[in-house]
């Protein structure tokens, strides 16, 4: 056992800790935050997400949780080791979404026709209908996206998770093998992590949440877990933490908790009920609310333009100026 591990287990008095700082000894990991690539979210979070944190991203079905997390993962993979494990989609489907995002990120000036053509070509690739060489020769836009993704995020590891085999211990082993200190593990989504000893959904979510938090702290990584709404949350105009499955455990263990909502539904009716222009503008946006933040401000709401055709949100957003439902 190292001296640092011994100190960690036995604790340390303030005088000793301050003395080590005074002598220039490093007491932390020496690893700063990793940015999501979304602004002003990164500024609000002090530069991004930190090792040892369990970060929660919740929302209604089809609100954009997976595509948002994929964008974060792609951006983080430029400087950190990253794993994206998904219970809903296989590796090919995730790659297709990443490539589509990459096309649009590289060429925001593309017209709709060119975007449709690129998406069709990428889909043919991930379905095995066309090979990479053929695609590179025939579709320069996709070729550039392939080169860009390979050059900037070649180590981003995609995993099709299993409701039988992808247990906490399995994720712990995968993280230990493939993530360096400061790396990021994405779980899409938390409520599907199997805990075979659990006798209820609430117990399973509680144990899975505790297990993921332990992985983050023991392996010096960040864990980002997506979370779905429970029955009480489906159809809510504005989803809150209490509407997520296993919300008690999630609220207790999460260091940062964010919720995605459709802006037109989450905005107070006084702003949109009698203004068609404002309503239409709201329909094109997603609200990301920082519901919990152990190291900074919470209760703040950001908005981002939807680009769901290209499996993404426009990463440059703004603070929401209107009041939301229940505020």
Image (cartoon, rainbow, N blue to C red):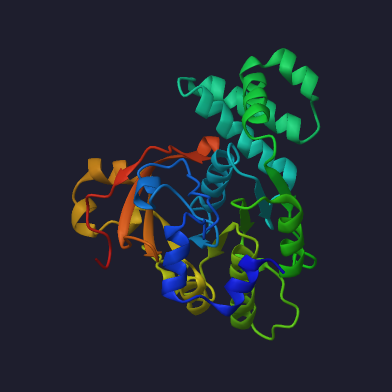
Q: Is residue 5 above or below residue 309?
A: below
Q: Can you give x and y, in whole percent of width and height, for residue 77 in the image?
A: 60, 40
Labels in figure, total: 0
Q: Nearer the viewer, residue 79 or 243?
A: 79
Whether residue 209 is visible: no
Q: Is residue 316 left or right of residue 87?
A: left
In which quarter of the view is residue 144 placed? top right
Quadrant in the picture for the N terminus: bottom right
Furthest residue to the bottom?
Answer: 199
In which quarter of the view is residue 39 placed? top left
Q: Nearer the viewer, residue 226 or 14?
A: 14
Quadrant in the picture for the C terminus: bottom left
In which quarter of the view is residue 306 placed? top left
Q: Can you give x and y, in whole percent of width and height, for residue 104 in the image?
A: 52, 28
The residue at 65%/50% (across/down) is 84
The residue at 71%/57% (across/down) is 175
Q: Can you give x and y, in whole percent of width and height, for residue 170 in the image?
A: 77, 64
The residue at 69%/86% (across/down) is 199
The residue at 74%/53% (across/down) is 160
Whether residue 95 is visible: yes
Q: Nearer the viewer, residue 3 or 136?
A: 3
Q: Can you give x and y, in whole percent of width and height, for residue 62 in the image?
A: 52, 53
Q: Is residue 30 above or below residue 284?
A: below
Q: Is residue 9 above or below residue 81?
A: below
């Amino acid at each position: 056992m190292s001296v640092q591990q011994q100190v960690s287990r036995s604790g340390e008095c303030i005088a000793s800790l301050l003395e080590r700082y005074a002598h220039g000894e490093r007491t932390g990991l020496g690893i700063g935050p990793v940015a999501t690539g979304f602004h002003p979210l990164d500024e609000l979070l002090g530069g991004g997400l930190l090792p040892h944190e369990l970060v929660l991203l919740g929302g209604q079905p089809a609100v954009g949780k997976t595509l948002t997390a994929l964008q974060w993962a792609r951006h983080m993979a430029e400087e950190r080791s990253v794993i994206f494990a998904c219970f809903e989609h296989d590796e090919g489907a995730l790659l297709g979404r990443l490539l589509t995002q990459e096309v649009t990120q590289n060429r925001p000036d593309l017209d709709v026709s060119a975007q449709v053509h690129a998406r069709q070509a990428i889909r043919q690739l991930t379905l095995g209908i066309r090979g990479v060489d053929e695609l590179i020769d025939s579709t320069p836009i996709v070729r550039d996206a392939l080169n860009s993704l390979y050059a900037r995020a070649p180590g981003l590891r995609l995993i099709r998770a299993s409701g039988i085999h992808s247990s906490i211990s399995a994720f712990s082993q995968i993280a230990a093998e493939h993530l360096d200190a400061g790396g990021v593990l994405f779980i899409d989504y938390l409520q599907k992590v199997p805990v075979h000893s659990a006798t209820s959904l609430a117990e399973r979510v509680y144990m899975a949440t505790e297990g993921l938090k332990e992985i983050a702290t023991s392996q010096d990584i960040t864990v980002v877990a997506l979370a779905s709404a429970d029955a009480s949350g489906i159809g809510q105009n504005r989803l809150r933490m209490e509407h997520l499955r296993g919300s008690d455990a999630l609220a207790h263990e999460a260091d940062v908790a964010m919720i995605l909502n459709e802006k037109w539904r989450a905005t107070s009716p006084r702003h949109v009920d009698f203004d068609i222009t404002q309503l239409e503008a709201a329909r094109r946006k997603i609200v990301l609310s920082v519901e919990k933040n152990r190291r900074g401000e919470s209760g703040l709401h950001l908005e981002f333009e939807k680009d769901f055709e290209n499996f993404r949100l426009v990463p440059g957003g703004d603070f929401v100026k209107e009041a939301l439902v229940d505020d």
